[in-house]
Amino acid sequence: MALERALVPFVPAGSLMPRLIKPPIADLEKAIGHEFQDRVLFARALTHVSAVASDAARSETYQRLEFLGDRVLGLAVSDMLCSTFPEAAEGELSRRLADLVRKESCAEVSIEWGVGPHLKLGDGEAQTGGRKKTAILGDVCEALIGAVFLDAGYDKARETVAKAWTARMHAPRRPLRDPKTALQEWAQARGKATPVYREVSRSGPAHAPVFMISVELEDMDPAEASGASKRIAEQSAAQVFLIREGVWTEKANA
């Protein structure tokens, strides 16, 4: 019995769990839609700066790939937007682009790909939840796009972006225009005059006034809202109007 115990080394509880639950790296490639020929490049795209020993080794991390991938992503999404919305003005395209390439959007793509378990992090970063941090996940998403670009060219990188971003492109999560602009464009499209904003009341102390603003559109009931400034109240009133008329939904514009 003593001999048997000597042959079985003590293993701390849970020490093997990361290896047991870590999915195969091939699963990540499948999610991305690309099998890397350059495995070193692939590994670098998943390596955070906290995982290297010195500043001299920063070239072994995803930082440069993130820089490249950010530009590739921007070009690919811009290309997709111009093709999908040929009648859209430059301002709308810019707003759509900004929403699609923001760090939070990239982090969501990383989560969908299942990047977290494959990240190479320093002990401190790993212990503080680095695998779930939006900034890191967003950066790695861009780094992986940059790595695909270097490994297989722009067409493959655009294919990767299209696979992950097409549905997002058709369902923007943020309003593409501010409420006043959206209401004005909505009114003009229906042959109506420009909306008129009127101050209904002002309350509160001089240093913290509250304005009640009404927005009026010909042949339609006005909508009212309050705010700490006339500008805020006007935007709120326009939003109330748009939601009331079913142009916007409260969920999409919360």
Image: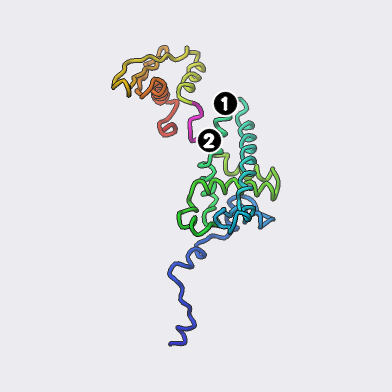
Main SS of residues in magenta: loop
Q: Which residue is mark 1?
A: 91
Frontmost residue, 239 versus 232: 232
Picture layout, residue 141 above or below residue 251: below
Picture layout, residue 95 above or below residue 43: above
Residue 237 location (% of width, % of height): 39, 22
Residue 156 location (% of width, % of height): 67, 45
How crowded pointer 2 is (Cα within 10 Å; few <14, some 14-19, many 20+) is rated as some
Quadrant containing the C terminus in the rendered view: top left
Q: Residue at x 58, y 57 (%)?
A: 52
Picture layout, residue 44 above or below residue 236: below
Q: Residue at x 54, y 55 (%)?
A: 50
Frontmost residue, 217 versus 93: 93
Secondary structure category for the residue under label 1: helix
Secondary structure category for the residue under label 2: helix
Residue 35 location (% of width, % of height): 65, 54
Picture layout, residue 178 above or below residue 14: above
Which dot marks residue 14?
none
Quadrant containing the N terminus in the rendered view: bottom left
Q: Residue furthest right?
A: 153
Q: Residue at x 61, y 46 (%)?
A: 66
Type of the residue with mark 2 = Asp
Stretch in magenta: 169-177
Q: How many marks?
A: 2
Task: Give the CA separation, mark 2 to mark 1.
Answer: 13 Å
Type of the residue with mark 1 = Gly
How crowded pointer 1 is (Cα within 10 Å; few <14, some 14-19, many 20+) is rated as few
149 relative to 4 in the view: left or right: right
Q: Which residue is mark 2?
A: 99
215 relative to 49 in the view: left or right: left
Q: Residue at x 45, y 83 (%)?
A: 5
Q: Does the magenta run of residues contain 170?
A: yes
